[in-house]
Amino acid sequence: MKLLMDGRVLEGGSSGVRDVASGLLQGLRSLQQQGRVDVTVATVGTTHAESDVQLPSRFFMHAWLPLTALRGRFDRIVVPRQTIPVLSPVQSVPVFHDVGFIDEPTLYRDAAKITATTRYASRARRALAVSAYTADRMAQLGLNDRVTPLPIEAVHDIEWRPERHDPYLLCIAAQEPHKNLPKLVDAWGTLDDLDARLIICGRPGNDSDALDRARSRLRRPASVEIASGLSAAAYAALLAGAHGYVQPSLYEGLCIPAMDMAAAGVPMVVGNHSNLGARFSGAPDGQAIDATDVDVLAAALRALLTDERFRQESMSYNRENVHMTDWLRVGEIFLEAIV
């Protein structure tokens, strides 16, 4: 089978979408070496190591990609995002990451374009999703009941070495309403008796002002640090040194940072909503919580910092139940689904 893959996301900055696309391509390249598939990656630039063919940036998706697939006699167009060409003589296969803006529209802003492209892409005859939760929700929402989930777990191998002399809890999240960051800061404000820091790392977004206001209300605003734009080395060090991890999101289609930290054996607290609730449903009491309740969230953060029994139980559960992604297996399941 000949596949033409839209590789533009590989040329962009760090993101979960890029991580999934890169891993999927890694699996497909392994299958290509075995002679089981033929993969060609289309990009705009010429500098990416995986680029096989370069296409004009204008009309890339809706003209040049399908035209190249037709001329090259490709069997499928692979788009590792939740969009597809409007018209194509070659069947397109999208990968869905998140349907929160359709499932819980009040948690999202400026989502009209991605909502429209997602609804259109959901008409595809064959489609994949980054988690069983996302595939199930798509079926329940009437978008597509033929979506195959990919077995994606942790993506980045973290060597956990917690900072003993300056303990901090870490949250990796863009400053968007569905990440629930102002409420996290409100909960943190009740822990003034503890000598620790909360670090929130993620790009600014629609909830940046609300996050700043929540931080300004704290008696110790300096105990909450907001970081973004870190180098790869600084980001890796930040993850490796955390005393614990917290992800209070109200909606996640996958949540790679939480998967990465869990696979490293880091104790954590997550919201019991969407994929995190599904993925950590069997976790120790107090790990997957109702993150909409400030008191519940505050109690969970206190346990994450001070309750050694909880920490050990969380560490053990995470190590035993979350593993590094086998990208070869992901590639095999992908290929089986699109034949």
Image (spheres, helix red, strand yellow):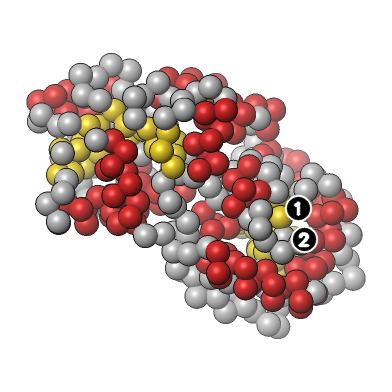
Q: Residue at x 16, y 45 (%)?
A: 37
Which residue is most to the top?
A: 87
Mark 2 residue crowding within 10 angstroms, few (<14) / some (14–19) / many (20+): some
Residue depicted at x 84% and y 58%: 298
Check disc 1 and give the amino acid type: Ile
Res. 85 image quadrant: top left
| Amino acid under disc 2 | Gly
Q: Where is residue 330 in the image (x, y as percent from the top left)?
A: 35, 51
Quarter of the image with the N terminus is top left
Judging by the rendered image, the residue that carries numbered circle 1 is 289
Q: Which sits in the foreground, 140 or 44? A: 140
Q: Where is residue 327 in the image (x, y as percent from the top left)?
A: 34, 56
Q: Residues within 10 Å of mark 1 (few under 14, many from 20)?
A: many
Residue 132 badge: none
Using the image, determine if residue 265 lies above or below residue 9: below
Q: Which mark is residue 286?
A: 2
Asked if residue 80 lies left or right of residue 57, the reply is: right
Quick one: quadrant of the C terminus?
top left
Comparing 79 with 329, the one in front is 329
Q: Where is residue 189 in the image (x, y as percent from the top left)?
A: 85, 58
State the image coordinates of residue 291 (x, y, percent, origin top left).
Answer: 76, 48
Give the structural element (helix, strand or loop) at label 1: strand
In this rendering, does residue 337 appear at all? yes
Horizontally, residue 27 falls left or right of residue 295, namely left
Q: Are marks 2 and 1 in contact (CB under 8 Å)?
A: yes
Q: Is residue 333 left or right of residue 231?
A: left
Disc 2/disc 1 C-alpha distance (Å): 6 Å
Decide if residue 239 is in sight here. no
State the residue in front, 190 or 331.
Answer: 331
